[in-house]
Image (cartoon, rainbow, N blue to C red):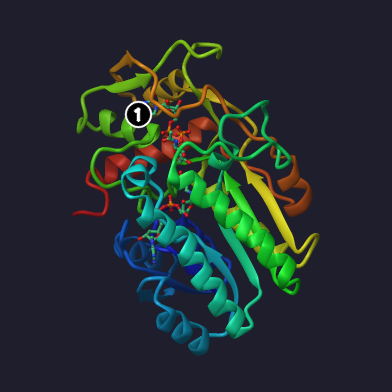
Amino acid sequence: MAILVTGGAGYIGSHTVLTLLERGDDVVVIDNLSNSSQKSLDRVAELTGKKPVVYIDNILNRDALKTIFSSHNITDVIHFAGLKSVSESIKEPLAYYENNVTGTQVLLNEMLASGVKHFIFSSSATVYGNPEKIPLSEQSRTGDCTNPYGTSKLMVEKILADFSRAQPQFRITCLRYFNPVGAHPSGRIGEDPGGIPNNLVPYISQVAIGKLGSVSVYGNDYPTPDGTGVRDYIHVMDLATGHLAALDSVDKGAAYKIINLGTGIGYSVINLIEAFEKASQKKISYTIVGRRPGDIAECWSDPSLARKELGWVATHSLDEMMRDTWNWQKNNPDGYKV
Ligand code: NAD
Ligand code: UD1
């Protein structure tokens, strides 16, 4: 029995593969390394003393999937593979729909052909668009995504809902992640964005290490306590255990489930900068600039369904998120490129 992890060399995938191997699961990975390095999986093997079986291939390649499903006794699929840059998705929408939407359809077809019925999908809080009301529960309105990346996630959720009605033997869980940050406490695996990071925490950590000069804070005139944007940051190790909990609960409850993975706590950009300064003992220079188009003022989760359905809660504090991000950044200033 093995678990297929698509995109397993990536940021969230590598932490989840590690957590699966640590508890004794057999893991098969497919990743085309379009946004990752195989070094992440080498380090997972070094940390766990166990190796996943790795296929360097594209999920759009039906033959590769057929080989995997016929060569291993796969019982469950955790589907991380996809493209995730909001700005890139605006420039290259077709690549985003092909990888994220068509890629998922190809995968589901091959699962259907092979009789594999358990599917966990990486969705995102981005599907909520501009929230009418917070905290965001799974019942909150979705849509109004301002970019093809967000739309691709919502499209896959809708495809999965239709597919589940047509194939009720399938057990499908969509996990809507809030803002993943942090790294494994060893500092050996973590987030390795190519080029200049778009997301706040990788940006702050590159300022702390001296690779970038100053954080641009996108707006201090939002209707939030200090005027800067508020988000629900969640430690990547909490996300990893969330996936294990989803696997363990796959046969319980409805055949198609949508569940938030967040902490339920919102922190502002300034809160993050201050917490990072404390963790790194470095001064983080920042400048207030205009709002980033497409940004929302605030967003955090109602995490109660995850507790009820999966028996899962996030346990890491903001200080732990910043400590582990800094530990990864300072030990790997150039990510996996060493
Ligand atoms: P990541 O880019 O680090 O990992 C994705 C992995 O998928 C990469 O290793 C990449 O090489 C691989 N991949 C991409 N397209 C592929 C394809 N066609 N075939 C095979 N492999 C392919 O991203 P991540 O942060 O680990 O995110 C994992 C998933 O979670 C993604 O689907 C992402 O959209 C979703 N998600 C991420 C965030 C976030 O902020 N990190 C938030 C919400 C949802
Ligand atoms: C962004 C994406 C979202 C995606 C998520 C994944 C946009 C508009 N949204 O969300 O679709 O699911 O990443 O992680 O890109 N900030 C700064 N300076 C920076 C970077 C960010 O002030 O250099 C602020 C932002 O305005 C926001 C907060 O920091 O208030 C978090 O930003 P970010 O890490 O990019 O995440 P999201 O905007 O929540």
**Quadrant location of residue 326?**
top left
Q: Is residue 68 visible to the viewer in this orientation of the structure?
A: yes
Q: Is residue 108 above or below residue 179?
A: below
- Residue 141 at x, y = what percent? 68, 37
**Quadrant location of residue 247?**
bottom right
Q: In this view, does 328 lie above or below 109?
A: above
- Residue 140 at x, y = what percent? 70, 36
Q: Which residue is drawn at 40% across and 29% down?
A: 279
- Residue 62 at x, y = what percent? 44, 79
Which amino acid is tagged 1?
Ser
**Quick one: 236 or 136, which is closer to the camera?**
136
- Residue 48 at x, y = what percent? 45, 66
Q: Is residue 100 above or below residue 145?
A: below
Q: State the residue position of label 1.
A: 280
Apparent side of residue 203 relative to residue 317 in the rendered image (left or right): left
Apparent side of residue 322 relative to residue 161 in the rendered image (left or right): left
Q: Which residue is drawn at 39% across and 19% down?
A: 291
